[in-house]
Amino acid sequence: MKNDHKRLGPLLNEVRACRICESYLPAGPRPILQIHPDARLLIAGQAPGRKVHESGTPFDDASGDRLRDWIGVTRDDFYNPEFIAILPMGFCYPGTGKSGDLPPRPECAPAWREQLLHHLPRLQLTLVIGAYAHAYHLPGAKGTLTATVQNWRNFRPDVVPLPHPSPRNNVWLSRNPWFEEELLPSLRKQVQTALSS
Ligand code: SF4
């Protein structure tokens, strides 16, 4: 990609000024991401919701509280970009449809993702949250989101598929007890190892 070797600071300024899909964003562009070249853990999520759009802080909501509990990190560590990078598949709030937030804007990942990932040389572990991030970071995954998460042991050891931690997924969590009983204990160990490396 032609801009791969751009320095992170100027690249971030470009991302923060991005207007590529402005006409589709009901609340306007407000790219929300967190990145530092020393980050060891990448959280690849979906797209900010309205509350996060308003606060400007990624996962500053009930989903974030659950995600921090899942991975066993404090708010301070979660928001330390030298530990954790947060790059959703769409950086701006895409609006809400009949059954919840709309998908991440499809323009976003092709425009920015590879360039930003290039600036994470110390990455040890990537958590991929939701179907759009699964499709990008685990292109070999087939089947439903549940099948992909249930198959977590069979992917690359540095990429872990997760469902969205939204309260909307409470039913999914109660139907899939193996997630909390088997996947989460292993995930917490992997996160600890990555952050202490
Ligand atoms: S969602 Fe991505 S591509 Fe669209 S305006 Fe925001 S940063 Fe740009």
Image (cartoon, helix red, strand yellow):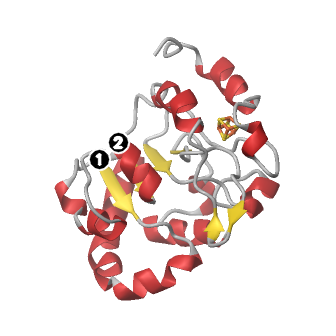
> Image quadrant of residue 51?
bottom right
Inspect the image, locate mark 1, and give the three-letter code of the amino acid beneath it. Asp
Q: Nearer the viewer, residue 121 or 62?
A: 62
Which secondary structure lies at badge 2? loop
Q: Where, quadrant-wise, is the C terminus in this rendering?
A: top left
User: What residue is rendered at 70% in x and 63% in y?
Assistant: 96
Left or right position of 179 against 97: left
Say what amino acid the circle numbered 2 marks. Answer: Gln
**Mark 1 C-beta to ligand 1 under 8 Å:** no
How crowded is the residue under tag 2: few (<14 C-alpha within 10 Å), some, or many (20+)? some
Report whether residue 197 is seen: no
Q: Would residue 145 appear left or right of 5 to someone viewing this image?
A: left
Residue in the image at 32% along x and 85% along y:
177
Q: Residue at x 43, y 58 (%)?
A: 131
Compare residues 105 and 159 and report the one nearer the observer. 105
Q: Residue 124's mark?
A: 2
Q: Residue 174: give x, y in percent of width and height.
A: 41, 88
Q: Which residue is mark 1?
A: 158
Q: Depth check: give the residue in front, 123 or 160.
A: 160
Give the Cα distance between marks 1 and 2. Answer: 6 Å
